[in-house]
């Protein structure tokens, strides 16, 4: 078929599917001047929406980074911290379903702008207690600033605890952003004009494989207001239509299980780095923000580039989503071998003589070496002895004297340090926990490398999964489907995952702190091995379940949709063959009916 024939066919197809009221050439082929406002509004919308996501991610990221600080500030266990973290999602439950349904039929930019205002007010409320609470005071052993003054921790345990006020810096400035993000949406129209150029043939073919479009225009007619009651009547049928779609329902279950794994892992990752590798809270959060978050962003961007460049089909998107999950969780398994052993803590992980290990019924902070000291068992003010063993407090180490040397506090004549000391017999110590073994820094480096690769791999399947979600449902139900999807993720993953992760992590606690009122506070020391197995094991188990559900999604796609598409192609080919056969027969019959000679034959030839 030559080029002119193809052009005529394409022109005929365009004219045949052209809606009523759009027959003018001016509408079919708009000029560059008419396209300019649409492009400007579209860019404004995309820029504003990106800024909204930036503000939302900034607020959520900051809340995640303060998990360990909240635990220490209010002296609460990890399970309660998980409840606080999960409660961030509860506010979405009240509006997300109705907004996603009615928002598709109303003024979307203004609804987004209103949501940004509410989000900004909410973040201001989160920051409000900072301005009304008293300054954070914690207790830490601190002798007088005069370095020549010597105090006995063993004899003056109760009087040597001087409160040191630490003023928490207000972080409310990051809240000056969600409110600003709402401004551009109030300047946008209800909808942007659709481009009149022909839709991509590959995209149209892809849609026809998976959804049946009734070609109904669901836009509200000009000048007619949307009727809320009529839309409300279609709510339950639309919901039934969504859950009746097997691909959508299975993908919803897959994402819910996988996000349980990811939410729990992300929430307690700073705590895991602190307890497993002996890093500070600030360094743990800094490392996560420096390398993990860019890896996730790069993975999401790479997934979108791959989908666009190679024009991957829905089945291909499902395979890419499955492959990224399988490879990511296989890499995650290697983290089991990259842990550090427990710190040597006298009376908890090792005996006061320095022997290993100590069973659960033998754990006791009191020994003969500190029996003459009036020590508190509930206090956790760790001291590192010269023998490399950490003691719960200088008093429990049996230290007799102490003084300040610069910023460090040094304890001397510690009887418990002496009995487990090396040949030198030095019995001194300094404030703070002892460092982990020499292999721990190397393990931490390996952990960071594997963590970055795993984050990139898992996020690589984000866009393919999203494309799979959008292409398996009818166009008029997309907004509603995304709302139900977000609701399920937040209700079934965002709220419960931090809670049960925190409850299970608390079971690995070796030393609990106590509040001034006497009730149990936050955990001071965890069993590193038990913490590692619970944290990583729960993440891998949930990830494995999501992989099996992803396989089911791919199986349903191939069984229900690809087979239907093949049967459709077969029927179409048969119809084309039949039409061609009839055409050839008609041509042959006409040729037989024509005479061999007619007037003007030579001239015509």
Image (cartoon, helix red, strand yellow):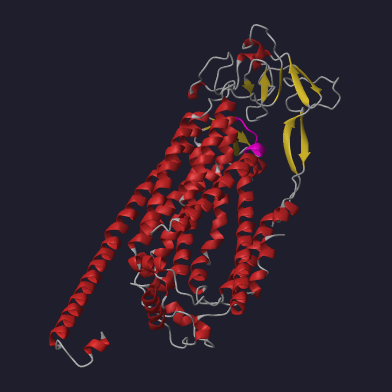
Query: At which x and y percent is residue 38?
Result: 59, 75
In the rendered structure, the answer to whether residue 541 lies left or right of residue 509 reads: left
Give the residue drawn at x 40%, y 53%: 254
Give the residue drawn at x 52%, y 76%: 194
Please check the rendered image and state whether residue 223 is part of the magenta-colored stretch, yes or no: no
Q: Is residue 104 above or below residue 86?
A: below
Return the residue nearer the eye: 438 or 172. 438
Return the residue nearer the eye: 284 or 350. 284
Give the residue drawn at x 66%, y 70%: 184
Give the residue drawn at x 18%, y 78%: 584
Q: Is residue 506 above or below residue 400?
A: below
Quadrant hosting residue 544: top left
Please check the rendered image and state whether residue 281 is part of the magenta-colored stretch, yes or no: yes
Q: Is residue 416 above or below residue 146?
A: above
- Evaluate whether residue 600 shows in this view: yes
Quadrant hosting residue 209: bottom left
Q: Is residue 28 above or below residue 340?
A: below
Which stretch is magenta?
278-284
Given the current orientation, which residue lies at the most extreme front position?
602
Query: At which x and y percent is residue 597?
Result: 16, 89
């Amino acid at each position: 078929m030559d080029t002119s024939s193809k052009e005529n066919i394409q022109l005929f197809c365009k004219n045949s599917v052209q809606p009523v009221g759009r027959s003018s050439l001016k509408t079919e082929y708009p000029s560059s001047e008419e396209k300019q406002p649409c492009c400007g509004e579209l860019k404004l919308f995309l820029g504003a929406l990106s800024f909204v996501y930036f503000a939302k991610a900034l607020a959520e990221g900051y809340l995640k980074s303060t998990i360990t600080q909240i635990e220490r500030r209010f002296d609460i266990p990890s399970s309660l911290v998980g409840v606080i973290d999960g409660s961030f999602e509860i506010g979405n439950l009240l509006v997300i379903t109705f907004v996603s349904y009615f928002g598709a039929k109303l003024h979307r930019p203004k609804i987004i702008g209103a949501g940004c205002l509410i989000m900004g007010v909410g973040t201001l409320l989160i920051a409000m207690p900072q301005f009304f609470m008293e300054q954070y005071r914690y207790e830490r052993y601190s002798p007088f600033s005069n370095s020549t003054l010597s105090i006995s921790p063993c004899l003056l345990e109760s009087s040597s605890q001087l409160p040191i006020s630490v003023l928490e810096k207000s972080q409310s400035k990051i809240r000056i952003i969600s409110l600003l993000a709402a401004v551009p949406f109030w300047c946008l129209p209800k909808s942007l004009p659709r481009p009149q150029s022909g839709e991509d043939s590959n995209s149209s073919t892809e849609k026809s494989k998976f959804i049946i479009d009734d070609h109904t225009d669901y836009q509200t007619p000009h000048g007619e207001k949307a009727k809320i009651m009529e839309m409300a009547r279609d709510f339950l049928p639309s919901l039934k239509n969504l859950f009746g779609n097997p691909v959508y329902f299975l993908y919803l279950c897959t994402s819910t299980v996988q996000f349980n794994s990811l939410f729990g892992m992300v929430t307690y990752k700073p705590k895991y780095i602190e307890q497993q590798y002996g890093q500070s809270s600030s360094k743990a959060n800094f490392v996560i923000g420096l390398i993990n978050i860019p890896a996730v962003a790069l993975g999401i961007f790479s997934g979108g580039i791959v989908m666009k460049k190679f024009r991957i089909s829905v089945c291909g998107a499902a395979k890419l989503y499955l492959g990224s999950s399988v490879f990511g969780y296989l890499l995650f398994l290697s983290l089991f071998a990259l842990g550090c052993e427990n710190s040597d803590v006298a009376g908890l992980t090792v005996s006061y003589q320095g022997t290993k290990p100590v069973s659960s019924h033998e754990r006791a902070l009191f020994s003969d070496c500190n029996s003459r000291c009036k020590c508190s068992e509930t206090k956790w003010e760790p001291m590192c002895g010269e023998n490399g063993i950490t003691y719960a407090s200088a008093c429990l180490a049996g230290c007799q004297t102490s003084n300040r040397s610069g910023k460090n506090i040094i304890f001397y004549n510690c009887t418990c340090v002496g009995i487990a000391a090396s040949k030198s017999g030095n019995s001194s110590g300094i404030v703070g926990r002892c460092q982990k073994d020499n292999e721990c820094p190397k393990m931490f480096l390996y952990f960071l490398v594997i963590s970055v690769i795993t984050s990139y791999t898992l996020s690589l399947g984000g866009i393919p999964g999203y494309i799979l979600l959008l292409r398996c449902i009818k166009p008029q139900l997309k907004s509603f489907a995304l709302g139900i999807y977000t609701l399920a993720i937040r209700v079934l993953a965002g709220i419960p995952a931090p809670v049960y992760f925190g409850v299970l992590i608390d079971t690995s606690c070796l030393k609990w702190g106590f509040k001034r009122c006497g009730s149990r506070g936050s955990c001071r020391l965890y069993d590193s091995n038990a913490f590692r197995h619970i944290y990583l094991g729960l993440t891998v188990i949930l990830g494995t379940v999501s992989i099996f559900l992803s396989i089911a999604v791919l199986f349903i796609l191939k069984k229900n949709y690809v087979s239907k598409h093949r049967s459709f192609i077969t029927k179409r080919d048969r119809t084309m063959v039949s039409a061609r056969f009839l055409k050839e027969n008609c041509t042959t019959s006409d040729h037989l009916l024509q005479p061999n000679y007619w007037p003007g034959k030579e001239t015509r030839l």
